[in-house]
Amino acid sequence: MKNPQVRALVFDVFGTVVDWRGSLIREGRALGAKKRLDVDWTAFADAWRAGYQPAMHKVRTGKLPWMNIDALHRLILDELLDQFAIHNLKEAEKDQFNRAWHRLSAWPDSVRGLKRLKKKFLISTLSNGNVSLLTNMAKNAGLPWDCVLSAELFHHYKPDPESYLDAAKMLDLKPAEVMLVAAHKDDLRAAKRCGLRTAFVRRPKERGPQVKPDLTADRVFNYNSDDFLDLADQLGA
């Protein structure tokens, strides 16, 4: 039987839509200048992101109760402040720095590409980021979402099947009417197993010049693209 027509595009956000690494390095350097901190902010940003998957795994396995990403980011941050010997931040400054994740900058093609795709499809986040984080980020970066879907709504982090299937339910669509757009092949494969369509977007700069990600086109995905503008061309948007 022929697949139903795709009606909604749901987007992974960190790394796919926004440049988390460059944004965190920028925020760290600004904090370092203000507080006179001698810190390798590139290493700090990479370590902060590296703590993300292990923290979610603790939630999945019951080692931690359900926590949203802001709370998990703060747990990781507190560990990193000790690791990098940063001891002179007030509580309000720690909270403000933790909210750097709310202020991540979009990749250069993101806003233009999303506006084009929005003309043809419903567009939404499907992110492990919490709702307040995603809405603040959208406001800050000018991301034109039709709605914001978050793992926080389902209490299941990607790649749990519930995160993909419940997103389709919330949109009142069949899984095959929804396409996940992501720069991460593991995310796409998990969505595909749940019956969603998939679009891979290459983000070669996500993890910096020392990391060479797998950017090869994969026929298992419905689309492979260089950026959102290329994806819009392929989808006729």
Image (spheres, grey):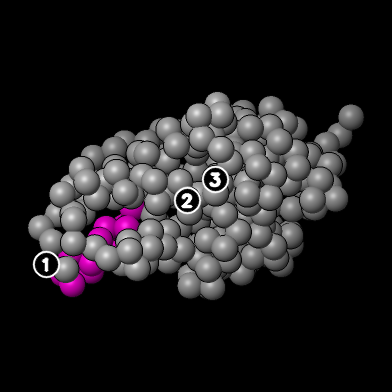
Of 4 and 128, the residue lying toward us? 128
Which residue corresponds to the image point at 13% horizontal and 61% vertical from the top-left? 37
Residue at mark 2 to residue at mark 1: CA–CA distance? 27 Å
* Residue 107 x/y as whole percent: 43, 60
Q: What element carries label 3?
A: loop
Callout 2, which amino acid? Ala
Task: Say which mark, if any, is on residue 71.
Answer: 2
Mark 1 and mark 3 in contact? Answer it, CB < 8 Å: no
Q: Give the quarter of the figure containing the C terminus.
A: bottom right
Q: Is mark 2 on a helix, strand or loop?
A: helix
Q: Looking at the image, which residue sits at the far front?
A: 91
- The mark lying in front, picked from 2 and 1, is 2
| Residue count near mark 2 (Cα–Cα under 10 Å), binned few <14, some 14–19, many ≥20 | few
Q: Is residue 26 magenta?
A: yes
Instruction: State whether residue 217 is above or below residue 103.
Output: above
Instruction: State whether residue 46 is above or below residue 35.
Output: above
Mark 2 and mark 3 in contact? Answer it, CB < 8 Å: yes
* Residue 193 x/y as whole percent: 69, 27
Which residue corresponds to the image point at 69% horizontal and 40% vertical from the top-left? 164
* Residue 213 x/y as whole percent: 37, 36
The stretch in magenta equals: 21-34
